[in-house]
Image (tube, rainbow, N blue to C red):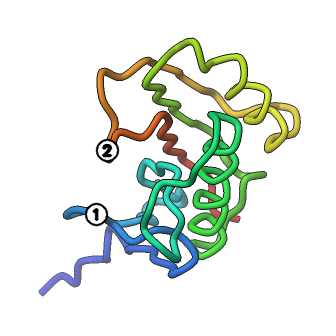
C-alpha cells in the first residue's frame, strides 16, 4: 500500500485575522506559502481599521507579515502578490506604502480594481512566498 504525502499544510496565527469563511490563512505546499487575501482587519477586534488607504495598507501588511512568519517565510521571500482595490484612485497612495515593504527586486504583482471586497474593505492583498 502506497503512503500518500500530505500535499498541503494549513498555517494559522492569532496575530492575523481569523478566516471569515471556509479557507485557511495560509497553505504550505511544494516549497511555497500561499497566503489568502488579507483585508485591513484588526486581529484583536475583527473590525476594519479606521483611516485612509495608507493606514489600511499598513494593516494589511501587518496581517500578511504575521501569516508569512507563522508559515516559516517572510516578506523578503514573497515572489508574487495581487492587490485588489475598491477604487483605482487609491493606487498612488497604496503603491507608496507597498513599496516600503519590499526591497529590490520587488515581487511580481498584479493590481486590479474590484467591484466589491469583503466587509466593504478598500484594499485586499494576497501573496505567494518561497519557504527557506
Between 80 and 4, the one lying in front of the other is 80
The image shows a total of numbered marks equal to 2
Q: Residues within 10 Å of mark 1 (few under 14, many from 20)?
A: few
Residue situated furthest top in the rendering:
89
Of callouts 2 and 1, the N-terminal one: 1
- In the image, which disc is placed on residue 59? none
Q: How far apart are labels 2 and 1 at the CA level?
A: 9 Å
Local packing at callout 2 (Cα closer than 10 Å; few below 14, some 14-19, many 20+) is few
Q: Which residue is mark 1?
A: 20
> Is residue 18 found left or right of 132 in the rendered image?
left
* Residue at figure coordinates x 72%, y 53% from the top left: 75
Q: Give the quarter of the figure containing the C terminus.
A: bottom right
**Residue labelled with disc 2:** 118
Q: Say what secondary structure mark 1 lies in.
A: loop
| Quadrant the N terminus occupies | bottom left
Q: Position of residue 10 (x, y in %)?
A: 38, 74
In this picture, residue 44 sits left or right of residue 86: right
**Is residue 27 depicted above or below 104 in this figure?**
below
Write the residue at 63% across / 62% down: 131
Q: Position of residue 4 (x, y in %)?
A: 23, 78
Q: Is residue 62 above or below residue 55?
A: below
Q: Nearer the viewer, residue 108 or 62?
A: 62
For numbered disc 2, what is the local secondary structure?
Answer: helix
| Residue at horizontal 63 percent and vertical 34 percent from the top | 53
Q: Position of residue 38 (x, y in %)?
A: 47, 51
Coordinates of residue 42 in the picture (x, y in percent): 54, 65
Tell me what residue is drawn at x 31 percent, y 76 percent. 6
Q: Nearer the viewer, residue 112 or 6?
A: 112
Q: Please report contact status of discs 2 and 1: CB closer than 8 Å, yes or no.
A: yes
Amino acid at each position: 500500500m502506497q503512503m500518500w504525502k500530505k500535499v498541503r499544510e494549513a498555517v494559522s496565527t492569532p496575530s492575523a485575522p481569523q478566516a471569515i469563511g471556509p479557507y485557511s490563512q495560509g497553505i504550505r505546499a511544494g516549497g511555497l506559502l500561499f497566503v489568502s487575501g488579507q483585508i485591513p482587519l484588526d486581529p484583536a477586534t475583527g473590525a476594519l481599521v479606521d483611516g485612509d488607504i495608507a493606514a489600511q495598507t499598513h494593516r494589511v501588511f501587518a496581517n500578511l507579515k504575521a501569516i508569512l512568519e507563522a508559515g516559516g517565510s517572510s516578506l523578503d521571500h514573497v515572489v508574487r502578490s495581487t492587490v485588489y482595490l475598491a477604487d483605482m484612485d487609491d493606487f498612488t497612495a497604496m503603491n507608496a506604502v507597498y513599496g516600503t515593504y519590499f526591497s529590490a527586486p520587488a515581487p511580481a504583482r498584479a493590481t486590479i480594481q474590484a467591484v466589491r471586497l469583503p466587509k466593504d474593505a478598500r484594499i485586499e492583498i494576497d501573496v505567494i512566498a518561497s519557504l527557506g
